[in-house]
Image (cartoon, helix red, strand yellow):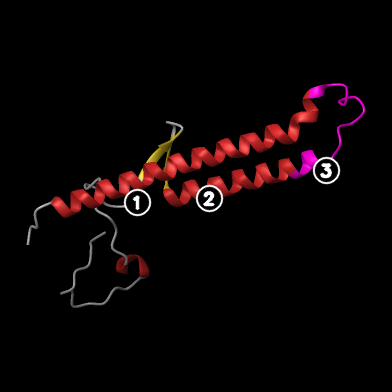
Amino acid sequence: MTQRTADSATPPTSLNEAVVRPDANDPDSGPIKIRAYGLLPLTKTAYLRVQVVAFAVFLLALIASLLIPPTAGLSEYRIFEFTPLIVAGLGVLEGVETLLMLRKFKAKESERESVKLNAPNDT
């Protein structure tokens, strides 16, 4: 696919031609990706979507642990008395992890900006 320039005589024939894609050879173009848990390279948008789902699951688990009493067979185990506290603690840890990851994204964004500002102009 060729990129269109401002001096092209013909208008784009499709939406895909009108969109300027980031250069595949330039690692600093395109969205910033950070490896979550050292495994999955995620963009900030994808990471935030995952976190929304995770927080929704934690919230549902907390509500369920507060409203649903343990059944007769499980009530003899004392761990179920602390289930709401455990779920809330895991939610707090997830929040801390989210803040740390968002700091990584911000650091990477500011690094990219400083490289762009310090790069010599080729024009």
Q: CA distance from mark 1 to mark 3?
A: 42 Å
Residue at 43 percent of width and 45 percent of height: 102
- Residue 119, percent across and down? 13, 51
Which SS class for mark 1?
Answer: loop
The C terminus lies in quadrant: bottom left
Q: Residue furthest top?
A: 77
The relative height of residue 69 versus residue 47 in the rendered view (above or below) is above
Residue at 44 percent of width and 39 percent of height: 100
Q: Nearer the viewer, residue 12 or 41?
A: 41
Q: Which mark is residue 31?
A: 1
- Residue 47, percent across and down? 48, 46
- Name which of mark 2 and mark 1 comes first in the sequence: 1
Q: Which mark is residue 49?
A: 2
Relative placement, left or right, of 110 versus 65 is left
- Name which of mark 3 and mark 2 comes first in the sequence: 2
- Residue 45, percent across and down? 45, 52
Q: CA distance from mark 3 to mark 2?
A: 27 Å
Query: Which amino acid lies under the numbered mark 3 shown in the image of this protein?
Result: Leu
Q: Which residues are magenta?
A: 63-78
- Residue 83, percent across and down? 75, 32
